[in-house]
Amino acid sequence: QVQLVESGGGLVQPGGSLRLSCVPSAYIFGIYNMGWYRQAPGKQRELVATIEGGGNPNYSDSVKGRFTVSRGNAKNTVTVYLQMNSLKPEDTAVYYCNYVTRVGVSYWGQGTQVTVSS
């Protein structure tokens, strides 16, 4: 069973930055799309940013211009990153990474907490 391992969350002051990383525990064949979602208390999970296999990124309006999604290609694994700048209190949430394969298999990470507060 492949697991997605996230890291990089934490507590940061408004205006600060964090970088999230997500690495699969084993090779995933045929990755079509990777990305990040978040869920704040009492709210539904929402898309933050995704990146296709070809490298085309997609962002929600709320993070456009502040967040950057990217991928890293190492031997036998593909890592997805989320660079978050100019963080706001409303960015506080649990952030989940997601990989989707060309045949529609979806993998989710366990979530990492991001808290933006002074």
Image (spheres, rainbow, N blue to C red):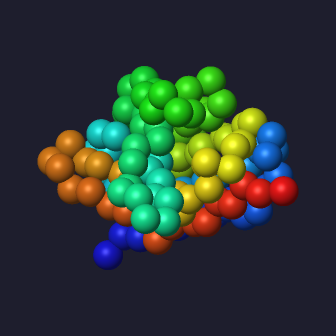
Quadrant location of the N terminus in the rendered image: bottom left
Task: Count the numbered circles shown.
Answer: 0
In the image: residue 12, left or right of residue 88: right
Q: Is residue 72 above or below residue 11?
A: above
Front residue of this view, candidates 22 and 25: 22
- Residue 90 position in % (x across, y down): 61, 48
Q: Quadrant of residue 58?
A: top left
Q: Is residue 25 left or right of residue 8?
A: left
Q: Position of residue 65 (x, y in %)?
A: 62, 24
Quadrant location, the C terminus:
bottom right
In this rendering, the answer to whether 34 lies above or below 43 is above
Report the residue that reaches farthest toward the left.
Answer: 103
Tell me which corner region of the image, top left, top right, bottom left or bottom right, holds residue 35: top left
Q: Is residue 61 visible?
A: yes
Up-down: is 60 above or below 116? above
Residue at the spot x=36%, y=70% of the render?
Answer: 2
Q: Which residue does the image show at 34% across and 40% down from the upper left?
A: 33
Q: Answer yes or no: is residue 25 visible.
A: no
Q: Position of residue 36 (x, y in %)?
A: 47, 48
Horizontal side of 103 relative to 97 (left or right) equals left
Q: Using residue 66 as the reference point, say whether residue 25 is left or right of it.
A: left
Residue farthest to the front, as pictured: 42
Q: Residue at x 41, y 70 (%)?
A: 3
The x and y percentages for residue 82 are: 60, 43
